[in-house]
Image (tube, helix red, strand yellow):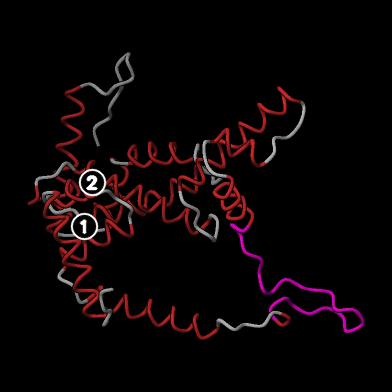
Amino acid sequence: MIPYSLNKSGAMPTTATNELKHEIWQLLREYQQSPSENIRNQLVKLNFGLVRKEAHYWTNQCHETYDDLLQVGCLGLIRAIERFELSKGHAFSSYALPYIRGEIQHYLRDKGVTVRIPRRWLALQQQAIGVSRSWREKHNRQPTDSELAAALEISPNEWQEIKLAWVNRAPLSLDVPIQDGEEGSTCLGELVPDPNYRSFQLAQEDQLRLQQALVQLEKRTRDVLECVFLQDLTQKQVAEHLGISVVTVSRRVKKGLDLMKELMGVADD
């Protein structure tokens, strides 16, 4: 492997950059012709900077450790290496970043709050913390809900919904022990009736039907739907990622959703 050094500005010299790109391209060609763990590990090492950059960004957005995010990001990089097609003519770094980012985002969702809160509400909740701090310093008291809503330029009703969503972002486990007088302790699940059990069963069945319908789609349409709905990429990002036009992405999304409805037997409203 060629050793590379940075110039005074911290950037890699152009010659070294070109040599690195050429080495990566050669290894990708070898891996596509004859996949091996050794070549894959070399590619991971050469592209590790992409993972470092993305992990560093997300450490400022969450409470997970940098090392954990590095490991997760490497899984995304490996997926990109395994799926990259030389014939498409894409730059590998541009191709790999959505995989690295998507893997980290999925990990954070799994590790994060159970109830998903809209991004706008999360932003308003964070803004409310700063407003409350400034209000205490200025008025020597906490702002009322009406004052907070006015400062955030939202309705009092929406602020109440944000507060409720934030409080209930991590549901209480049904296995939590509850004291039951002389009978000793029991768990919350045994005391709470479950009238929605049938609804839960139906939701599980719908998820299975959804997965079965997805695998029946043509590969390119399935890839587009996965990028849009599972990796949270914009249609423009999907177009760049898959090497197709934004119009094609839009058509594939509509076609895919229509086929999914047909396969699942869902009638339009």
Q: Residue at x 32, y 80 (%)?
A: 209
Q: 65 above or below 190? A: above
Q: 124 above or below 203? A: above
Q: Amino acid at mark 1?
A: Arg
Q: Residue at x 26, y 82 (%)?
A: 265
Part of the protein shown in magenta: 168-189
Question: The C terminus appears in which quarter of the rendering?
Answer: bottom left
Q: Which residue is mark 1?
A: 83
Residue 219 in the image: state x and y as whole percent. Answer: 16, 67
Q: Which residue is mark 2?
A: 237
Q: Residue at x 61, y 59 (%)?
A: 170
Residue 190 in the image: state x and y as whole percent. Answer: 71, 82
Q: 119 above or below 254? A: above
Magenta stretch holds residue 247: no
Instruction: Using the rendered view, name the quadrant where residue 89 is placed.
Output: top left
Q: Amino acid at mark 2?
A: Gln
Magenta stretch holds residue 187: yes
- Side of 191 where 269 appears, left or right: left
- Side of 147 where 187 appears, left or right: right
Q: Earlier in the sequence, mark 2 or mark 1?
A: 1
